[in-house]
Image (cartoon, rainbow, N blue to C red):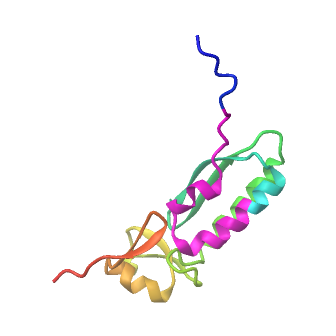
Amino acid sequence: MPDHSTAPVPRPAQIPERADTVGPGWQESLGRLHRQLRALAPGYRLVDLGEKLGGLHVHVESVGDDSDALRALIAAAEAESMCTCEFCGAPGRVRTREDAPRGWRKAVCDTCHGPWSAHHLMIVNGAVRGRPHEE
């Protein structure tokens, strides 16, 4: 049987490894959250990171650290995302395409809302992409 005791122990995934799952407008907030989490729980493990109902969603696990403090930091970042455009980082709010009563929700500013509503803006691997206009 092979001896795996010298194999490197994989480092737990943290925010920087998954930051590209959301748009560039939230990157500053994610960087700040990562630094804050590392200060309290250097070995925290990222379980989930993404956009949910228009805002940022972050779930981490940490052993032996102050979970209430970690949750408070995450809640603050998630609340900040709800008023920050995911595309550009400008002040925004959670809206639906064309402000329809139902539909996909995203935190957008007034400038990005129109192109997003018209399906001309999207986020792919953490970067804003413009869709080609249909002729």
Up-down relation of residue 95 to residue 74 (above or below): below
Which quarter of the rendered picture does the C terminus lie within?
bottom left
Q: Nearer the viewer, residue 132 or 80?
A: 132
Is most of the magenta stretch helix, strand or loop?
Answer: helix
> Is residue 43 inside the magenta stretch?
no
Query: Which residue is at 31% across, 81% downward?
Result: 118
Quadrant where the N terminus sits is top right
Which residue is at the far top?
1
In the picture as drawn, the residue positioned furthest to the left comes out as 135
Name the quadrant containing residue 104: bottom left
Residue 89, image quadrant: bottom right
Determine the residue located farthest toward the bottom in the rendered image: 111
- Which range of residues does the magenta coloring cover? 8-34
**On the image, which quarter does residue 55 sit in?**
bottom right
Image coordinates of residue 4 in percent, x first then y, are: 64, 22
Instruction: Name which residue lies at 68% across and 34% down.
Output: 9
Left or right relative to 98: residue 89: right
Across and down, in percent, residue 74 comes to: 70, 59
For the point 58% across and 84% down, the residue is 90
Q: Is residue 76 visible?
A: no
Could you tell me residue 96's position as x and y percent?
A: 42, 75
Q: From this view, report whether residue 69 is shown above or below residue 90.
A: above
Q: Is residue 88 visible?
A: yes
Residue 44: percent from left, percent from top: 73, 47
Q: Is residue 9 rendered magenta in the image?
A: yes
